[in-house]
Amino acid sequence: MEKLLGKLRSSGLKVTPRRKAIVELFLREGSVLSPNDVFVALSNSMGKCGLPGIYRNLETLASCGILFRVVSFGRERRYALCRPEPESSLHHHHIVCVSCGKVGRVPECHYRDGMRIEGFRLVSHIVQLNGLCASCAEKEDGS
């Protein structure tokens, strides 16, 4: 928890009670959450907690690498906790279970900013893999 909040501080942002509560919620849940999920989960404990403020805080947490925005088929934004492993490089990607929302880490990436691909110079990239976690795949195979 403290390491995640340190990312917020190192980005020049304050650790507010609401941001801390959001990070704690993602740590507790361990899966993909929508802004509305966060709003419902925190509305009792946070008092005046409006949905626009939740959206702003989720985007702030995503901008400093604590959360990442999950690409989904619907129009609703969804977020998940980004947990890079300490001994590896910070650059990594994610795999998301399309059934339960569990998030895994894909540490290996063959793309580097500045490299040339088909005549293009890569300036940034976002990769998200979608699949079934072991538990959901087992349920599907057993049906």
Image: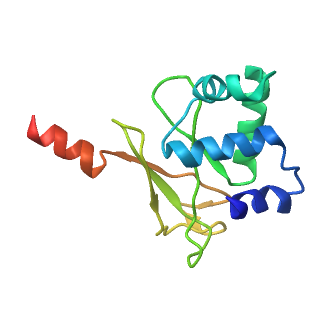
Q: Please provide percent x and percent y for residue 16.
A: 84, 44
Picture layout, residue 67 above or below residue 120: above
Marks counted in the figure total 0
Residue at 17% across, 38% down: 140
Picture layout, residue 37 above or below residue 28: above
Q: Is residue 131 shown left or right of residue 95? A: left
Residue at 12% across, 42% down: 141
Picture layout, residue 49 above or below residue 119: above
Q: Quadrant of residue 84?
A: bottom right
Quadrant (top left/top right/bottom left/bottom right) for the N terminus: bottom right
Q: Please provide percent x and percent y for residue 14.
A: 88, 49
Q: Please provide percent x and percent y for residue 129.
A: 41, 49
Quadrant (top left/top right/bottom left/bottom right) for the C terminus: top left
Is 1 or 95 nearer to us in this picture?
Answer: 1
Residue at 67% across, 53% down: 66
Is 86 or 109 nearer to us in this picture?
Answer: 86
Picture layout, residue 66 above or below residue 100: below
Q: Is residue 79 shown left or right of residue 94? A: right
> Residue lying furthest left in this view?
142
> Residue lying furthest front in this view?
45
Q: Quadrant of residue 8?
A: bottom right
Q: Please provide percent x and percent y for residue 73.
A: 45, 28
Q: Quadrant of residue 45?
A: top right
Q: Is residue 97 shown left or right of residue 34? A: left
Residue at 64% across, 46% down: 24
Is 50 or 115 nearer to us in this picture?
Answer: 50
